[in-house]
Amino acid sequence: MSRREGVQNVLILIAAVLILWQGVYWLVGNVALTSPVETLLKLGALLSTDWFWGDVLESLRAMTIASLIVAVAGALIGIILGLHRLSADVAEPIIVTLYSIPKVTLYPIVLLIFGLTASARIAFGVMHGVLPLTLFTMAAIQNVSPVLVRSALVMHLTRREIVRRVVVPAALPGIVTGLRIGVSVTILGVLLGEMFASKKGLGFRLMNGIQNNDAPTIMAIAVLLSAFALTVNSLLLLLAVRQRTRVAP
Amino acid sequence: MSRAGWIRLIVIAAAVAALELACRLGLIDRFTVIPPSEMAMALAEVATSPGLVAEIAASLANIAIAVMSATVAGVAVGIALHRLQRIRRIVDPLLSSYYALPLFAFYPFFIVLFGVGAVPIVIMGFLAGLAVMVLATLDGLDAIPRVLLKVAKMHQLGAVATALRVQLPAAAPHVLSGVKLAIAYGFIGVIASEFILSGHGLGFAVGYAYNSFDTRTMYGLILFIVLMVIALNLVLHAWDRRLRLRRSRLAGPP
């Protein structure tokens, strides 16, 4: 598939979603649904108020801090475990099991530890994101071709140099893919944290919308969050593609 | 058991023992975390209380409906997209970035539309499992050996007969692997929705215990859900391994 066709397909997809949305709007009527144009206007109106920006920045801050913690902790743990075969064998099933648990059920524990603070929402986001990044990093490190390590040994590189200059760069495409998935679920985790027992952030505004029966605000925020998450995802996807072509031209 | 397995067991036992000790010595206060031994006792109390059985039944019913509808819809969409390759290429970016979407941002919207109750919860479970079913069906249909389709053509089977007698059976192992993931995702979708806002189900019960400062019941419930998910995953994992074995046998020697 050529690059031009790819761009074309995305544009067609966006147009199709908008047409479908408008069609459903005409069918259901404006009781609970707003049309695409109305939603964008509502979003514009929300973005011109100070209180809404307060919530946007609150969410953005929590998501950014959580993502940074995920990136550093997940990559470090993954690299350390990936370099040691036995540790990886011991840890992997534990991490996979933890990953499969619905994290929401653990949120009350996080709330009891951190209280109703931004720290609790950040910690909850980190819980979501750190496990997939660790798993991906671990697998990427283990899959580095032994030939590369052997040639580095032949060149008398020290163990530290091998890790820093050979193993980690070779594993980078896999790590970036893990980062993309990790950041996506971190965003979701912070949002979930805001939706339960919080008085700040976009998640809180969404839940507030239920109480006020305010569908236009809910839709505007849901669209904003989706656009944000998709943008972050696409940027990290682009980075992963770049990495892959750099490693194997 | 392998060496890694034994070490794993020791690591987990040590972690539980350390938590027990920290709680008993008062390093962690009882309002935050209760000792694991008390969690186990709370679990026994919770599991035998009649109130919980109703919540479990409510959650499992929601999960079952969500997963079944996601499976049917996912397979149907998968087959349709496989037929219409042009549309498949257009929808592809949506499928590959589907799980990057913050799905729960749409939960309040469904509540406003359908009211607080089972319907928005089932929809969330359905949406959580849908994309993975579509992707699994497409994978399965892509992996069918050309030979099988040629045989179908030789026997002059029509499009419907080919789909029912050749394509679906050949793609079945992939589709069932998808069902495995759909169950896991549907579980998360349903429990999380119940937790955020609802009046029934396991997720609701945990949130309710938290809000009424009933730490003991809360830990009992959390332990129950965690053990249930681990058991479910073990069963699904074993099932998936059997499917893989069957698939490799079907493919025959290379």
Image: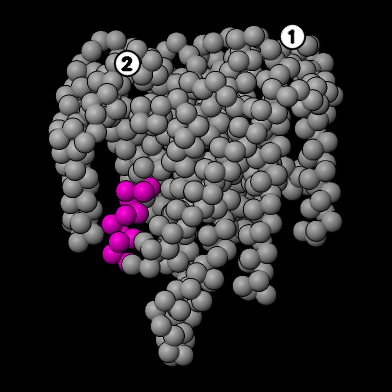
On the picture, is A28 further left or further right than B26? Answer: right
Residue beneath disc 2: B213
The quarter of the picture where residue B3 lies is bottom left
Question: In the image, what residue type sits under mark 2?
Answer: Phe
On the picture, is B80 further left or further right than B52? Answer: right
Instruction: Residue A218 in the image: state x and y as whole percent.
Output: 67, 20
Instruction: Residue B245 in the image: state x and y as whole percent.
Output: 38, 54
Residue A94 magenta-drawn? yes
* Residue A249 higher or lower than B59, as above or below: below
What kind of element bears circle 1? loop
For the residues bearing labels 1 and 2, Cβ distance under 8 angstroms: no
Residue A113 magenta-drawn? no
Dot 2 falls on which chain? Answer: B
For residue A31, which numbered disc appears in the image?
1
Picture residue at 51% right of the left edge, 22% below the top: A198
Residue A188 appears in the figure: yes
Q: Which of B173 and A170 is in front in this view?
A: A170
On the picture, is A27 further left or further right than A103? Answer: right
**Dominant secondary structure of the residues highlighted in magenta in the image:** helix
